[in-house]
């Protein structure tokens, strides 16, 4: 039997948030980019039904990520962990979740486009 998998991705979501090790970073804030890929076996039904209730609601996924980005943290790893567990809790019919959070132009003393972490939760 064929394995049927649907991956739902939201890419390059941009947020202005207050994450960082330094107090100044948490006070001033900076821009972040978030990508998420969610394995959604239940969404296979939507291939035939064309009904929103048979898949993940992209707006609900975005809103959950936005709410987690609004809570300041010192580490991107912490933000990503909160986000992944929130998505698992809110959308119980999901499989693997892979997400990345990039801090754009981090203050590392040189020209760096972004620092990024990638987290996978199965």
Image (tube, rainbow, N blue to C red):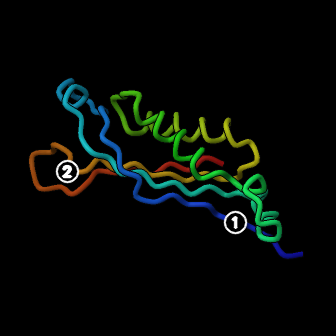
Q: Which residue is mark 1?
A: 6
Question: As drawn, which residue projects farthest toward the right?
Answer: 1
Question: Are circles 1 and 2 on residues that touch, CB within 8 Å?
Answer: no
The numbered mark, 1 or 2, whose residue comes first in the sequence reads: 1
For this rendering, which residue is in front, 75 or 90?
90
For this rendering, which residue is in front, 57 or 27?
57
Instruction: Give me the residue at 52% from left, 34% from top.
Output: 82
Neighbourhood count class around disc 2 (C-alpha, 10 Å): few under 14, some 14–19, many 20 upward: some
Disc 1 to disc 2, how far (Cα)? 33 Å
Instruction: Give me the residue at 70% from left, 65% from top.
Output: 6
Neighbourhood count class around disc 1 (C-alpha, 10 Å): few under 14, some 14–19, many 20 upward: some
For this rendering, which residue is in front, 29 or 100?
29
Q: Residue 53: x percent and y percent?
A: 76, 52
Instruction: Specify the quadrant that holds the N terminus.
Output: bottom right
Q: Quadrant of residue 85?
A: top right
User: Circle 2 — which element?
Assistant: loop
Q: Residue 109: x percent and y percent?
A: 9, 46
Residue 113 shown left or right of residue 92 in the figure: left
Residue 42 shown left or right of residue 18 in the figure: right
Asked if 39 appears above or below 103 in the picture, the reply is below
Res. 103 mark = none
For this rendering, which residue is in front, 49 or 89?
49
Q: Quadrant of residue 25?
A: top left
Q: Residue 67: x percent and y percent?
A: 48, 34
Residue 42 shown left or right of residue 13 in the figure: right
Q: Which residue is mark 2?
A: 105
User: Circle 1 — which element?
Assistant: loop
Question: As drawn, which residue projects farthest toward the front?
Answer: 51
Instruction: Give me the residue at 37% from left, 28% from top.
Output: 73
């Amino acid at each position: 039997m064929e394995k049927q998998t649907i991956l739902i991705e939201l890419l390059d979501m941009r947020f202005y948030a207050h994450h960082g090790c330094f107090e100044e970073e948490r006070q001033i804030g900076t821009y972040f980019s978030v990508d998420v890929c969610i394995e959604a076996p239940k969404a296979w039904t939507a291939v035939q039904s064309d009904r929103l209730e048979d898949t993940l609601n992209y707006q609900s996924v975005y809103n959950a990520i936005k709410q987690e980005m609004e809570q300041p943290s010192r580490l991107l790893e912490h933000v990503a962990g909160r986000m992944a567990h929130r998505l698992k809790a809110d959308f119980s019919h999901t499989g693997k979740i892979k997400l990345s959070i990039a801090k754009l132009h981090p203050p590392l003393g040189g020209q760096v486009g972004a620092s990024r972490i990638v987290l996978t939760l199965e």
